Amino acid sequence: MRVDVKFFQLSFKVKGLFLISIALIFLLVNTQSLKAQTHKKTSLTLKNGEVLYGRIISNDSLKGIYFENECGIRIIQQNDLDTIQPYVKENFFSLKKKGYYNLSSLALLFGEGRNDNVPVPSLTIVNGYYFHPQIFTGLGMGYEYYEWSVLPLFTEVKYLFKKDGVVPFASLKLGYGISLKKEDQVNDYYSSDVGKTYGGALISPEVGLLIPVGHKDAFLISLGYHHQELSYNSYQYYYWLSSTDYMKKRVYTNYNRISFRVSFMFR
């Protein structure tokens, strides 16, 4: 009988220790969870477009928000704040939702020109501003060579189709190619003479892929259609009359090319 009593006493003690252990574990887990929520990483978006990642130490409507990250403690005034959101892993789209960007590119333009089918090199630089993480707008200039050197001036709009990973995009350039050579030696069916050169309209739609490099920059690869209009003056002489008798006409050449472009975006 005593053995049974001792057994039940021992069993009761074991059960008690087990219940106490469970209670301690539950309390510890909840304490850690509460601590993690108190120091939860937060994303602050300011009205100037800057995005900050860190922890809110205190939030006072008068003194402002005391915000801590790897750079130290910063005080954010309420009127400078746009939104407060839970931390989302930093990527190309979440880090800077609007701001300045620079796009430098090198391309080869394949197709037939007036005399041959040698690929035309194209160097361009675009400086712009994006008001939305998927829409980039800018002004660009560059250098291209056809029958003579050309300075393209254009506006560009680029749209990105999604917000993570490798991103497909479409872009459109509209502008004007300025001739960098005032006169050119003309050798055509009518005559061999020096004629004035002119630039013309530039149209270039493209599709491609944006490959993020870190959180701010990216490589871009694209394929598209490139149209450049150029022209020159040609003089037709009438040798059976006087050597000073001639007819001047404007000769237009439309360069329709397939473009393969590699670019680097810096923000």
Image (cartoon, helix red, strand yellow):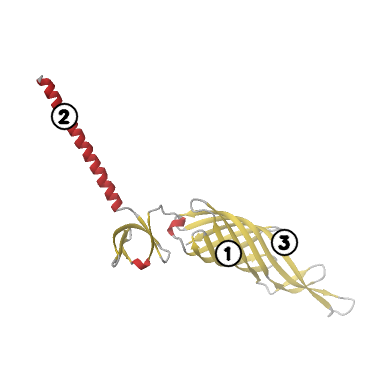
- Foreground disc of the pair 3, 1: 1
The residue lying toward the viewer, choosing from 105 and 77, is 77
- Foreground disc of the pair 1, 2: 2
Q: Is residue 31 above or below residue 235?
A: above
Query: Residue 181 is drawn in which quadrant?
Result: bottom right
Q: Is residue 47 above or below residue 26?
A: below
Q: Identify which residue is drawn at 41% across, 54% down.
A: 90
Q: Identify which residue is drawn at 21% across, 36% down.
A: 21
| Circle on res. 113 | 3
What x and y, as percent, mark residue 73?
30, 62
Q: Is residue 6 left or right of residue 256?
A: left
Mark 1 or mark 2: name the one nearer the start of the chain.
2
Q: Identify which residue is drawn at 45% across, 58% down.
A: 216
Question: Gap in Å between the C-alphas at discs 3 and 1?
Answer: 25 Å
Query: Residue 49 is drawn in which quadrant?
Result: bottom left
Which residue has dot 1 on it?
156
What x and y, as percent, mark residue 259?
64, 57
Which residue has dot 2 on it?
12
